Image (cartoon, rainbow, N blue to C red):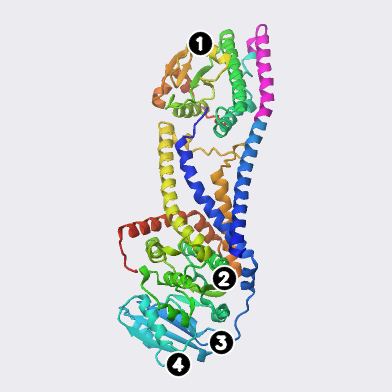
C-alpha cells in the first residue's frame, strides 16, 4: 500500500474518530445535565414540603411571620433556566425533562396558591401573572416575544411574580388550574391579577394588563434572568 | 420560559457539516503526511554542495520600485557567480522599469532583455530561451526577495531525475498591517501544505516566487502558456500529467510582497481562483478524480474545488443565518429597553456551555490550522511573529475570502476576463 493510500485511509479513520469523540462528548455533557437536574429535583422535593408546611402553619401563625419566605429559593428558581437549556438540547419529549418539568410545574402551582392565600389572609397584594405557552408547532408564534417581555418585567420589577406553564403538559394539577382559571387554548395566555388575556402584540400594550402601581416604583434587581 | 431555536437554524447548521468533515479530513491527512518518513527525509536534506548551472528569470511589468531589491537579493545568493545567470525580462513596462533594468547592463551575471508586452508567460519563455546552457531555471517575480541560502536548499530537490520542478518556502515580505500579517499566516500554512504534499507528489502549483524547473523537461513540455492568467498552476498540472514529480524545498525561503488593501487582495485572489477553476474544469479535467494521478487527482484537486464552492456557499448560509438571527432578535426585543437587551447573559457554569457539534468541530479544525502554521514556520525557519496573523486569519479572513470565491465563480460562469492588475 502506498504512503498516500495508507495516509488517506488512516486520516479517514482518525477524522471519524475525532467526530465520534465530539459526538460522545456532547452526549456525555447532556447526560451530566440530566444528572444535575436530578440533583435539583431533590431540592424541589424539599421546597414542595416547605410550602406544604407553610400551608399548615398559615392556619395559626401571625401574618408577620408568613409574608416572607414564600418565594422559590434561588436554587429552585434557576431550575427554570436549566430546564429550558435541557429542553432545547434534549427535546421537549425527553422523559427525564418531562418528569422534572412536571415537578417544577407542581411546585409553581403550590407557590401560587400559597401566595394567593397569604394575600387573602394578611392583606398583602403581590402582583402575580400566570403565563401559558405552547411548544406545539404553529400553536404560538408570539410566545418567544411574550417570554422575553415577561423576563424583562420580572427582572425590572422584582415584586412581580410570574408563573410559567406549558399548557400541553400532561399533569393533572395543571389541567385543574387551567380549568379553575378558565384558560382557553389560545396562546400566549395570561392570567394577571385574576384577569384572563390572550395574545401578545407589544410590550407597551402588555404592560397595560398589569396594575399601574407595579410600575410606580422602579427598582432594578440583580436576580438572574430566568 | 422556553425560547425556542427555530428548526431553520438547525437545518442551516447541518449544511456546514460535510464541509467541516472534509476540512478536518484534509488537515489530518496533511499532519499524518508531515509525520511520515518521506517528509522527514525531505526535512533532513542538506543544502547542496554541488553547483549545477542555473538561470533565474525575472519577468517584470511595471516593477520600477521593487526590481532593485529583487536583483540585489539574487546577487547576494550563496552560489558561484559563474554558475548563476540572472535574466531580467522587461515585458513592455510603461513606467521606469526599463531604465532601472538597464542600469544592470555590464554586470556579467545579469542579462537584460526588453520585449513588447506579451504577458508573463511570454517573458518567462523568453528568459528560458536566453538561458540556453542552464540545467535548471528558476522564476522570481520582481516583487520577491530570496534568502542567501535559498538556491543551495533548492538544488537537492532535483537529485531524482523524474523531478521536474521544486517549490520554495514562501512567506510575506516584512508584513506590517493586519492584512499582510493574515496573508503571512496563510502563506506559512502553504509552506506546511506544500512540504507535506511533496511527500505524496500532490503539489498542484509552482508559485511565481522562486519555483525551479528542470530546463530539459520544461522544453519538452513546450514552455509556459497563458493558461487563464495562472501559468504557474498550469505548468504544475502539465508536469503532473506528464508523469513527473514536483518537489519542495522547505528551507528555501523567499519573501514576497502581498496586496496591502482588501480590494487589491480580492483582485489578486480572483485571478488565482478563477485560474484554478478554469484550468481544472477545462484543460485538466481529466486529472480530477483520476486514480492515475494519486493524491493530486483524488484529493487535492477535488477538495480545492469543494473549498471554493463550499467557502462561498457557507458564507451565504452564515450570512443568511446572521440576518435571520438579527431579524429574530429585533422582533423579540422590540419595545424592550436596550439596557436590558444588551445586558451580558453568559454564564460560567458548565451547565450552560454552548458545546454544539458545529462549535466543537470548528474548534478542532481551528487548532489543526494553527498547528499547520506553527509547523510551516518551524520547518522553514521563517522568522515571523505570527500571533496577530493567526488571530486575523482565524477571525477576519473568513469574511473577505468569500468575496473572491464568489467573484471567481461568477467570472468563470459568465466567461468574464479581468486585467492582471
Give the image location of residue B26, x and y in percent.
55, 57
In 3D space, how far apart are the residues under numbered discs 1 and 2 (Cα atoms)? 76 Å
- Judging by the rendered image, the residue that carries numbered circle 2 is B382
For residue B164, side relative to residue A4 (left or right): left
The secondary element bearing badge 3 is classed as: loop
Give the image location of residue B95, x and y in percent.
32, 78
The secondary element bearing badge 4 is classed as: loop
Q: Nearer the viewer, mark 4 or mark 3?
A: 3
Question: Circle 4 marks a residue in which chain?
Answer: B
Q: Which residues are magenta?
A: A37-65
- Judging by the rendered image, the residue that carries numbered circle 4 is B108
Quadrant assignment, res B409: bottom left
In 3D space, how far apart are the residues under numbered discs 3 and 1 (Cα atoms)? 96 Å
Give the mark nearest the N terminus, 4 or 3.
Answer: 3
Front residue (pair A175, A111)? A175
In 3D space, how far apart are the residues under numbered discs 1 and 4 (Cα atoms)? 103 Å
Category of crowding for the residue at label 2, using alpha-carbon neighbours closer than 10 angstroms: few (below 14), some (14–19), many (at least 20)? many
Give the image location of residue A40, x and y in percent.
66, 27
- Judging by the rendered image, the residue that carries numbered circle 3 is B51
Amino acid at each position: 500500500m502506498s504512503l498516500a493510500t495508507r495516509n488517506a485511509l488512516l486520516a479517514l479513520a482518525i477524522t471519524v474518530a475525532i467526530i465520534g469523540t465530539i459526538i460522545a462528548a456532547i452526549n456525555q455533557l447532556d447526560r451530566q445535565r440530566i444528572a444535575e437536574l436530578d440533583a435539583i429535583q431533590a431540592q424541589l422535593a424539599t421546597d414542595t414540603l416547605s410550602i406544604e408546611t407553610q400551608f399548615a402553619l398559615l392556619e395559626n401563625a401571625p401574618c408577620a411571620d408568613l409574608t416572607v419566605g414564600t418565594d422559590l429559593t434561588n436554587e429552585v428558581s434557576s431550575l427554570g433556566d436549566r430546564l429550558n437549556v435541557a429542553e432545547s438540547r434534549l427535546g421537549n419529549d425527553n422523559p427525564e425533562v418531562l418528569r422534572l418539568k412536571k415537578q417544577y410545574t407542581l411546585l409553581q402551582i403550590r407557590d401560587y396558591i400559597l401566595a394567593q392565600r397569604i394575600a387573602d389572609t394578611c392583606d398583602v397584594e403581590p402582583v402575580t401573572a400566570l403565563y401559558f405557552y405552547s411548544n406545539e408547532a404553529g400553536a404560538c408564534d408570539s410566545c418567544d416575544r411574550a417570554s422575553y417581555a415577561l423576563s424583562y418585567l420580572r427582572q425590572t420589577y422584582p415584586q412581580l411574580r410570574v408563573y410559567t406553564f406549558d399548557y400541553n403538559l400532561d399533569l393533572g394539577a395543571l389541567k385543574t388550574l387551567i380549568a379553575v382559571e378558565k384558560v382557553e387554548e389560545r396562546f400566549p395566555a395570561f392570567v394577571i391579577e385574576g384577569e384572563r388575556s390572550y395574545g401578545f402584540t407589544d410590550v407597551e400594550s402588555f404592560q397595560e394588563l398589569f396594575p399601574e402601581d407595579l410600575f410606580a416604583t422602579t427598582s432594578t434587581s440583580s436576580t438572574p434572568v430566568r | 420560559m422556553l425560547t425556542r431555536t427555530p428548526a431553520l437554524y438547525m437545518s442551516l447548521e447541518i449544511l456546514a457539516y460535510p464541509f467541516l468533515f472534509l476540512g478536518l479530513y484534509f488537515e489530518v491527512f496533511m499532519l499524518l503526511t508531515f509525520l511520515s518518513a518521506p517528509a522527514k527525509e525531505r526535512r533532513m536534506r542538506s543544502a547542496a554542495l554541488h553547483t549545477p548551472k542555473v538561470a533565474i528569470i525575472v519577468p517584470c511589468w511595471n516593477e520600477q520600485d521593487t526590481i532593485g531589491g529583487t536583483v540585489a537579493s539574487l546577487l547576494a545568493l550563496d552560489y558561484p557567480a559563474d554558475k548563476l545567470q540572472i535574466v531580467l525580462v522587461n515585458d513592455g513596462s510603461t513606467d521606469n522599469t526599463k531604465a532601472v533594468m538597464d542600469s544592470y547592463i555590464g554586470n556579467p551575471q545579469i542579462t537584460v532583455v526588453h520585449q513588447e508586452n506579451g504577458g508573463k508567460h511570454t517573458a518567462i519563455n523568453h528568459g528560458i530561451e536566453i538561458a540556453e546552457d542552464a540545467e535548471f531555471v528558476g522564476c522570481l517575480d520582481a516583487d520577491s526577495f530570496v534568502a542567501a541560502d535559498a538556491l543551495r536548499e533548492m538544488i537537492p530537490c532535483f537529485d531524482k531525475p523524474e523531478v521536474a520542478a521544486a517549490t520554495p518556502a514562501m512567506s510575506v515580505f516584512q508584513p506590517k498591517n493586519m492584512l499582510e500579517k493574515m496573508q503571512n499566516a496563510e502563506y506559512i500554512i502553504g509552506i506546511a501544505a506544500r512540504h507535506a504534499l511533496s511527500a505524496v507528489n500532490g503539489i498542484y502549483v509552482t508559485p511565481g516566487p522562486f519555483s525551479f524547473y528542470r530546463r530539459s523537461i520544461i522544453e519538452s513540455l513546450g514552455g509556459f502558456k497563458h493558461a487563464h492568467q495562472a501559468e504557474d498552476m498550469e505548468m504544475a498540472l502539465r508536469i503532473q500529467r506528464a508523469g513527473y514529480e514536483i518537489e519542495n524545498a522547505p528551507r528555501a525561503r523567499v519573501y514576497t510582497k502581498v496586496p496591502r488593501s482588501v480590494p487589491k487582495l480580492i483582485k489578486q485572489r480572483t485571478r488565482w481562483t478563477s485560474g484554478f477553476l478554469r484550468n481544472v474544469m477545462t484543460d485538466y479535467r481529466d486529472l480530477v478524480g483520476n486514480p492515475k494521478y494519486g493524491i493530486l487527482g483524488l484529493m487535492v484537486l477535488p477538495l480545492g474545488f469543494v473549498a471554493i464552492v463550499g467557502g462561498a456557499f457557507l458564507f451565504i448560509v452564515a450570512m443568511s443565518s446572521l440576518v435571520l438571527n438579527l431579524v429574530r432578535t429585533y422582533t423579540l426585543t422590540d419595545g424592550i429597553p436596550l439596557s436590558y437587551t444588551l445586558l451580558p447573559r453568559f454564564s460560567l457554569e458548565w451547565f450552560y456551555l454552548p458545546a454544539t457539534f458545529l462549535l466543537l468541530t470548528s474548534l478542532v479544525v481551528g487548532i489543526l490550522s494553527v498547528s499547520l502554521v506553527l509547523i510551516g514556520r518551524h520547518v522553514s525557519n521563517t522568522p515571523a511573529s505570527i500571533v496577530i496573523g493567526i488571530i486575523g486569519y482565524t477571525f477576519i479572513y473568513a469574511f473577505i475570502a468569500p468575496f473572491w470565491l464568489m467573484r471567481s465563480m461568477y467570472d468563470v460562469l459568465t466567461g468574464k476576463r479581468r486585467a492582471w492588475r
